[in-house]
Image: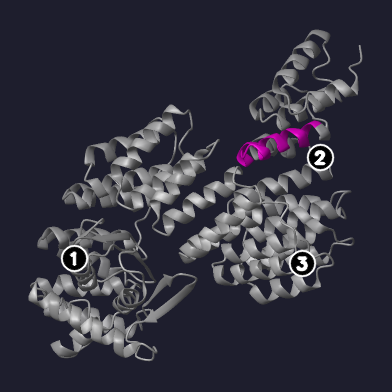
Amino acid sequence: MLVPQAVLSQARYKPSLAQALHGQLLKWGLHDRHPYSASLIDSYAKSRLPHHAVRLFLSLPLPPHPVAWSSALSACNLSSHPRLSLSLSLPILRSHPTLPDHFVFATLFNSFASLAPLHLSLAKQLHARFLFSPFSQDDVVKSSLVDMYSKFSLPLYARAVFDSISSFNKASWTAMISGYARNGFKNEALRLFREAPNRDLFAWTALISGFVQSGNGVDALHLFVKMLREGVEILDPLVLSSVVGACANCALWELGKQVHCLVIGLGFESCVFVSNALVDMYAKCSDLDAAKGVFFGMWRKDVVSWTSIIVGSAQHGRAEEALALYDSMVSAGVKPNEVTFVGLIYACSHAGLVGKGRKLFRSMVEDHGIRPSLQHYTCLLDLLSRSGHLEEAENLVRAMPITPDEPTWAALLSACKHHGNAKMAIRIADHLLSLKPEEPSSYILLSNVYAGAGMWENVSKVRKMMMVMEVKKQPGYSCIELGKESYVFYAGETSHPMKDEIAALMRKLDEEMRKRGYVPDTSPVLHDMDQQEKERQLFWHSERLALAYGLLKSVPGTIIRIVKNLRVCGDCHTVLKLISTITSRDIYVRDTTRYHHFKEGKCSCNDFW
């Protein structure tokens, strides 16, 4: 009995119809015959039932029909299971060297692209097989290769494949533009974009998204404005999520709100990945209330939605909220991922919930089968260190299966110093010193630990190592956003048009702080100079300049938001707490390690960062 093609087509996107048709084909004994099996697998793929598709595919006789094979791989890729597509295909590739066809090649290269940077060697082996196959000139497969090598951060490989394409299409142009842009080849990306025969929305999206991914957020935003001025109609929301991401990375709160209005105006507020980007943006711009407003207004929430709001709450010191959100997430039937647990353990470290943090770490491994990464171990180390469990923290560092890096040892050393465990601090410092650290902050920490223990020879050794290794501290700068303008202040800057007003306010605040018992902590200044000069250096730190400018120019009573490219030093942290009390202003500072909310003389990090 033949099944009409119309019935097979109707089963796509309709899970219940696909399953009913599968049952009927089983009765007729046609479930493993082409084209019925391939159509069924395709129906399951488009109905987001990948495991049904894979189960049916595995029941087919070998070698599989290429159409059924590519449909099964598409099912895996559409449901974000690229590893499953490879595990299905590798045994077939080994036992049937004459396979696959061009559809399977393209789908497999897409799977490798999703797994980058893993499995590069296997990807190259498959590329070699493609070159010796009858389909070696297929331009669609070559476009997939361009995308794959771009995501492996090999734009030169991608360009070699791109140049071999005989008939360029939209996919090949956008893949190569994206490959250059996302890997930091800014000029090459712009040049190729200008040469593109069709500079449509997809070409603009490839360029803008690539710039955001490579850290060129400001350039991406300028391009987006140019795209709008050229009248390119936004029919697909992907570019909007990238632009929102650029606002998040640059902490451009006002601009982010404007893009949010554009999202609403274009009717894309119901798009899950755009809403996820908005939640992340508001959280990174220290507006957690707005992030929660977007999150709770979403009709459908996926794991990224939940994780974004959990991590955002954790980063801003709202541990109880983060843990309550996780309970709601589990109740909603959403399975957490690796990033979710990073946020949760981070939240526990802020609240000192050692038992809860240990329990979550075990649950991650035992209940969810997630292998801990270095980031998970670092968060657990932070939790134990903050709470004074220093021996357990050291045992964790020495026993974990991943080699601890410099920041891990520095974090443990910082905890020893914070809790006054001099003996352990010296032991950890000696080990960190033997690693020949590269970060200036590590040398500052080492110098302070040795100086605190009166080990002046070691202090001298640390400073000599800095000179030999030419360790140079990155120039500090802070950004402050006021209205539609963003201003950047560098440490020691004296060229600003309002330098006199800024200096006068800073001196006035300094005088008031000293009346309240403030004594400058000059330990972060390692240069050989007198005490007065060290205090002068601290006085001109970039976050203080940005704050003074914000106090002078912002609307009284509003929150002052500052972003710093380096870790806030201990003295500036004390100063910011005092100024929040003196001026009765909330001050939000985002540095490279934490989000600090200064209010009424206290900080959300509880003075441990």
Tell me the CA gap for discs 3 and 2: 25 Å
Residue 506, visible in the rendered structure: yes
Q: Nearer the viewer, residue 289 or 168?
A: 289
Q: Which dot marks residue 160? A: 3
Question: How many residues crowd mark 1 within 10 Å: few (<14), some (14–19), many (20+)?
Answer: some
* Of the two numbered discs 3 and 1 in the rendering, the one whose residue sits closer to the viewer: 1
Frontmost residue, 563 versus 410: 563
Residue 369: x and y, percent?
A: 44, 34
Question: Residue 138 vs residue 393: left or right?
Answer: right
Range of magenta residues: 68-84
Three-letter code, disc 3: Ala
**What residue did someone put label 2 on?**
99
Tell me which residue sits at (31%, 68%) in the image: 556
Quadrant where the C terminus sits is: bottom left
Would you say the residues marked 3 and 2 are in contact, meaning their CB atoms lie under 8 Å apart? no
Dot 3 and dot 1 residues touching (CB under 8 Å): no
Residue occupying the point 67% across, 40% down = 77
Circle 2 packing at 10 Å, graded few (<14), some (14-19), many (20+), is some
Q: Give the residue at the far front of this rendering.
A: 556
Q: Nearer the viewer, residue 232 or 87?
A: 232
Q: Report crowding for label 3: few under 14, some 14 to 19, many 20 or more residues within 10 A (C-alpha).
A: few
Numbered badge on residue 299: none
Judging by the rendered image, the residue that carries numbered circle 1 is 581
> Of the residues under marks 1 and 2, which one precedes in the sequence?
2
